[in-house]
Amino acid sequence: MIKNILKSIGYFFSILLFMSCNMSDELKLFNGESLEGWEGSNTFFRVEKGAIVGGSLKKPIDKSYYLCTKQKYENFELKLAAKFITSDLEVNGGISFRAKRVPNSNEVMGYQADIGYIDASGIALFSDFTPKDTTGIYPLWGSLVDENRPNTLRYPKPEIFPVIIYKVADEELVETVIKSKDWKEVLITANGPDIEIKINGVSTAKYTEKGDVPQTDVFACKHTRVTILKFGIKTS
């Protein structure tokens, strides 16, 4: 998300996709062995023990990295599990959807289901919500973000970064459904203009898009700064 307040991460990614309006057609986006069907840095992203892994515990990162599906998707349920390998909670990443790469940039444009934490003082800059405590970090697991689209009128502070947090997940709710070192199950549902995000089975964000934005595009795994973020693809 917002690069100047993020840390590098590593992650495992596990994904099961249900396509079509009635969500009856099941697709596996990751075969558990290789990055076939994905495009992005094969030195930054890799497969380890049946999971997609990004990042390093040793080498800092100066920008965001994205691993994107080659195929585009429209209406879907995307199921995955994610975890960070780090002793530092102030880490952040995300799963971008209905997204595409920004030309001549390392960024992508589109929606993002946020995972991890962020400096609480930055939330009010990019949303209509101000945390009670702005001195620490805030759990953004399950929050809905939109970034980098050409129409910067969507964004409250485009001169800083073209991003908006449409739905900030409730802090107390998120803290009750996650444990910092465990795998978190993420479910993203997109059907027409309606979007919902769930973490470990609990709804954390609902949003209905009112603007004219593309509803068909790719998925992307996002990694920024030093740690390891793991995404694991479910096989059942």
Image: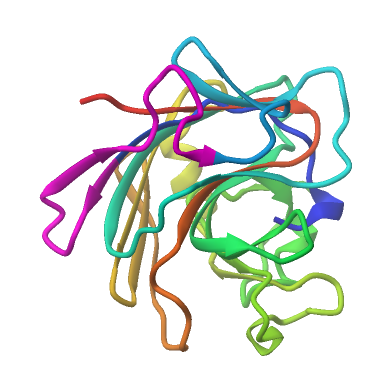
Instruction: Provide the residue span drawn in magenta.
Output: 17-38
Quadrant containing the C terminus in the rendered view = top left
Asked if residue 176 lies left or right of residue 24, the reply is right
Q: Nearer the viewer, residue 181 or 85?
A: 85
Q: Residue at x 66, y 86 (%)?
A: 151
In the displayed structure, would residue 187 be above or below residue 226?
A: below
Q: Is residue 116 visible?
A: no
Asked if residue 69 lies left or right of residue 158, the reply is left
| Predominant SS of the magenta segment | loop
Asked whether residue 150 is drawn in magenta, I would say no
Q: Residue at x 18, y 60 (%)?
A: 20
What is the image's colouring?
rainbow
Q: Residue at x 74, y 73 (%)?
A: 162
Q: Nearer the viewer, residue 159 or 68?
A: 68
Q: Is residue 11 visible?
A: yes
Q: Residue 170: give x, y in percent of width and height.
A: 49, 56
Asked if residue 214 lies left or right of residue 221, the reply is left
Q: Residue 66: give x, y in percent of width and height.
A: 65, 45
Asked if residue 179 lies left or right of residue 84, the reply is left
In the displayed structure, would residue 12 be above or below residue 172?
A: above
Asked whether residue 18 is drawn in magenta, I would say yes
Q: Residue 163: give x, y in percent of width and height.
A: 69, 70
In the displayed structure, would residue 122 be above or below residue 225?
A: below
Quadrant containing the N terminus in the rendered view = bottom right
Q: Residue 79: give x, y in percent of width and height.
A: 33, 41
| Tag count | 0
